[in-house]
Image (cartoon, rainbow, N blue to C red):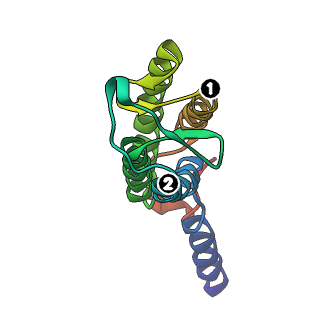
Amino acid sequence: MSSSAGTARTDAKSTEGDKTPAQLFAYVAGAVLVLAGLIGFVADSSFNTGSDIDGDKLLGILEVNGIHNIVHLASGLLLLAVAPKRATARLGVLAFGAVYAIVTLIGLIDGNDVLGLIPVNPADNVLHIALTVAALAAGAVSSDKDARPAGNGGRTAR
């Protein structure tokens, strides 16, 4: 009987540490976006809009300005906030993917900016496409169930 209880405890511990693809995406993309937002202020901290919008290049590739940096910070913090729980990670990552899909479409249609506020270039558009696809895929394949069924020793069916 004690070996059965020990096995159940071991199984419960191992499954509690498992992160869903949505959680992994939220942690990794969230941290990278926060870092990009902070470093972006070194490249360009201006808040010009409209015809005056002219960002500088982050890492010599991605077009940024102050507003773009704030969007990166906010997106990253949102992802980090939803990451700890499976259900919030899945919903948050899917919402992130949907919003970035819209941003991507606007950036591709205009080519130079998003709503006259955020400068973009082809590299930004490629990054936005990659983030959109990765977020939607991670959210789609992730379970939102935090609770483990009580009757099977803490193991979940996969």
What amino acid type is highlighted by mark number 2? Gly
- 3 vs 38, nearest the viewer: 38
Q: Residue at x 58, y 58 (%)?
A: 19
In the image, is 135 to the left or to the right of 45? Answer: right
- 31 vs 59, nearest the viewer: 59
Q: Distance between the Cα atoms at labels 2 and 1?
A: 22 Å
Element type at mark 1: helix
Circle on res. 122: 1
> Could you tell me which quadrant the N terminus lies in?
bottom right
Numbered marks: total: 2
- 120 vs 152, nearest the viewer: 120
Residue under numbered circle 2: 30
Crowding at mark 1 (Cα within 10 Å: few <14, some 14-19, many 20+): some
x%, y% of residue 146? 44, 56
x%, y% of residue 51? 36, 23
Is tag 2's residue or tag 1's residue first in the polypeptide sequence? 2
What amino acid type is highlighted by mark number 1? Pro
Is 40 situated above or below 18?
above
* Quadrant of the rendered image containing residue 127: top right
- 108 vs 150, nearest the viewer: 108
Crowding at mark 2 (Cα within 10 Å: few <14, some 14-19, many 20+): many
Spot the residue most to the top: 109
